[in-house]
Image: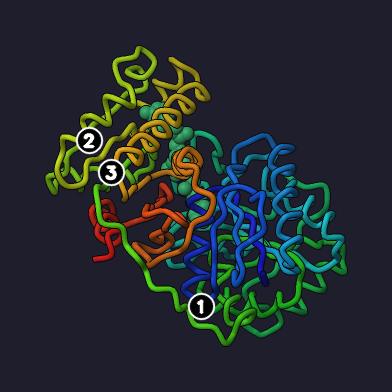
Amino acid sequence: MILGAIGDDFTGSSDLGLTLAAGGMQTIQFVGVPDVPAPPGVEAGIVALKSRSVPAPEAVRQSLAALDWLRAQGCRQFLFKYCSTFDSTPEGNIGPVIEALVEALDTTDPVIVCPAFPATGRTVYQGHLFVGDRLLSESGMERHPVTPMTDADLRRWLARQMRASVGHLPLRAIREGHAREGLLNEAAAGRQVVVCDAVADSDLLALGEAGQGFALITGGSGIALGLPRLLAPKRQNSETWQGAQGAALALSGSCSAATRAQIAAHAAAGGAQRKVEVADLVEGRETAARALAWAQAQDGLPLVYTSDDPAQVAVAQERFGDARAASLVEGFFAELAAAAVDTGVTRLIVAGGETSGAVTEALGAKALAIGPMIDPGVPALRVQGRPLALALKSGNFGAPDFFLRAARVLEGT
Ligand SMILES: Nc1ncnc2c1ncn2[C@@H]1O[C@H](COP(=O)(O)OP(=O)(O)O)[C@@H](O)[C@H]1O
Ligand SMILES: O=C(O)[C@@H](O)C(=O)COP(=O)(O)O
């Protein structure tokens, strides 16, 4: 294996998988740290963790276990993938994980930090992260229930999470062709971890080149854009996508504005929908068995969702506690997904990072092959060794007609 990647959630890992596979690398997304060696021929291995919102010491422990396994597969270059909106808190987990990886790798190479993903509107300029034309801290992400991003200055935000000083590589250095020199200068000045500007794919390609040979690079999936050409230049992605024919089911625990618009579009297109309230789960009015029986009686693409607007989510959290509400919802979707697949569903579309993590783990999937793009950042996936196709959609990604289109792509039509 040439490139070893560690993803801090499942949707983000598939986003990275899409970039690497589209660039021609033989890429596999592993579900957690495997306990067996990687299959032969894999060039890029992504260990998908559910470590974004766990306490920092636990995220560090999981990430180091992933690093150990990737090193045992022969990787010498590593990528840490986090969210393009830099989802984290003042305590972590991005900074602590980077520091732990640097220490374990015993490297003095500069470490690029760049969540930019221009195709989805995330850009970094003067050390600040933008979502479209808004600063991250005015984009809605400042109200995220778990990782409210209240400061768009990535240098300042990351410095709160780290012991060491944070460096900065300005856009001008990249555009004038001095990116590698700038990174090395920052590291020599004691600022090994460097927030890098990037507003276009060409900046990300230049950064990839500037970081050639560095032990660790970190970022959103955009930072991997140039890696296939640099690491596996002669390869073409020869995988042909094999869809899965059979029943489809969509599940959504994502409460983002993008997902809620996709749910509305699915309803407007006549899709069958079942809304589940947290109170229904607490009080036993709704169960996975009931939701499955309902889904089996529907045509087309039935959608079961708990997604709600921020005010309603806040009411449920107030009433039942944040962690309890989340764990009830995730437990419900995990049980429903496993039962649905047991009874013949072969195409599963899941919206939400945490929701996708819970579902994928419950399916007992060990490794996922990367298929074609459904929307930027979201590939079709196939569970290896089983006739089961998945789409794991980040809350913020996807066009309004995502659900129905995903069902078609998963089918291979
Ligand atoms: N109605 C609800 N009330 C409270 N929490 C909810 C509700 N619906 C979903 N959740 C929880 O909110 C979180 C949504 O996160 P996630 O699945 O990562 O979506 P996104 O990718 O949009 O952030 C999950 O932990 C989920 O269990
Ligand atoms: O980089 C991104 O934005 C995505 O790949 C990602 O990490 C998605 O996270 P969720 O929005 O929590 O699904």
Q: Earlier in the sequence, mark 1 or mark 2?
A: 1
Q: Do labels 2 and 3 touch, CB within 8 Å?
A: yes
Q: Position of residue 304 (x, y in %)?
A: 28, 35
Work out which quarter of the rendered image holds the C terminus and state it. bottom left
Q: CA distance from mark 3 to mark 1?
A: 30 Å
Q: CA distance from mark 1 to mark 2?
A: 38 Å
Residue at the far top in the pictured view: 283
The reply to whether residue 177 is visible in this rendering is yes
Q: Residue at x 26, y 54 (%)?
A: 407
Q: Position of residue 58 (x, y in %)?
A: 71, 37
Q: Nearer the viewer, residue 11 or 181?
A: 11
Q: Which residue is mark 2?
A: 295
Q: Residue at x 81, y 62 (%)?
A: 192
- Specify the amino acid type for callout 2: Ala
Crowd class of label 2 (few under 14; some 14 to 19; many from 20; radius 10 Å)? many
The reply to whether residue 123 is visible in this rendering is no
- Specify the amino acid type for callout 3: Leu
Q: Is residue 25 left or right of residue 173?
A: left
- Specify the amino acid type for callout 1: Gly
Which disc is residue 249 wearing?
A: 3
Q: Which residue is mark 1?
A: 24
